[in-house]
Amino acid sequence: MGKGRKRTFRQELLMCMITASVLPLAVCSLFLIQLFQMKISGDYRVMDMELAEEVNGRLELLFSKFEELTGKFCGDGEIAEALRQSDSGNSGEVYRTLYRETKELRDYAWFELYGMDGTCRYSTGTGTYQRRMEPYWGILRKAAEEEGRLVVLRADDPSGDAVLQAARLISDEQGNAGF
């Protein structure tokens, strides 16, 4: 029982042929798999960059529209006057202007007009009318410091979500009127 069967020349030749043909096939298969993985990761990297550029372009367009809109509000004397007065007689006109000008952007943001005391006087959102923000802190302070520019900051929502806030100081010949 000790020793196994002795192989014949044919069996030895068959084993050598199988080894000689399978070994290069296995090595080539491993290289092909690695090349395929590199190609796929490269393709995904390119797709990710293209997608990031598209998202960046859309955000830049959106924020340029916000910049343009806030510029219109800053140049509107009725809005400045309404923000200066606590009880404005032209609030209907201010709301019409606010809703008309923000029509195409309301899917992306709420628009609110604040007096210099930090009280929300006009809003396209729900539940924000008469809400108070401190003018010496946060986004309103930053907007007052950077007069004439749209300021964007990250803020925490009461629900715990992180949101972006944007503000711009509204002023005219008579001075600062609101945000």
Image: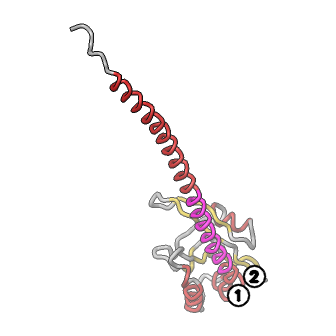
> Quick one: SS at disc 2?
strand
Mark toward the start of the polypeptide (1 vs 2): 1
Q: Position of residue 71 (x, y in %)?
A: 70, 80
Which is nearer the eye, 174 or 35?
Answer: 35
Q: Are marks 1 and 2 in contact (CB under 8 Å)?
A: yes
Which residue is depicted at the point 75% across and 82% down?
Answer: 172
- Residue 2 placement: quadrant: top left
Q: Check disc 1 and report the residue beneath it.
A: 77
The magenta-colored residue range is: 46-69
Separation of marks 1 and 2 at Cα, in angstroms = 7 Å
Q: Position of residue 164 (x, y in %)?
A: 57, 64
Which is nearer the eye, 112 or 49?
Answer: 49
Which is nearer the eye, 108 or 126?
Answer: 108
- Position of 13 with respect to 136 (left or right) is left
- Is residue 64 found inside the magenta-colored segment of the image? yes
* Colour setup of the view: secondary structure
- Is residue 127 found inside the magenta-colored segment of the image? no
Q: Check disc 2 and report the residue beneath it.
A: 172
Residue type at mark 1 is Gly
What's the magenta bit mostly, secondary-structure-wise? helix
Q: Position of residue 174 (x, y in %)?
A: 77, 82
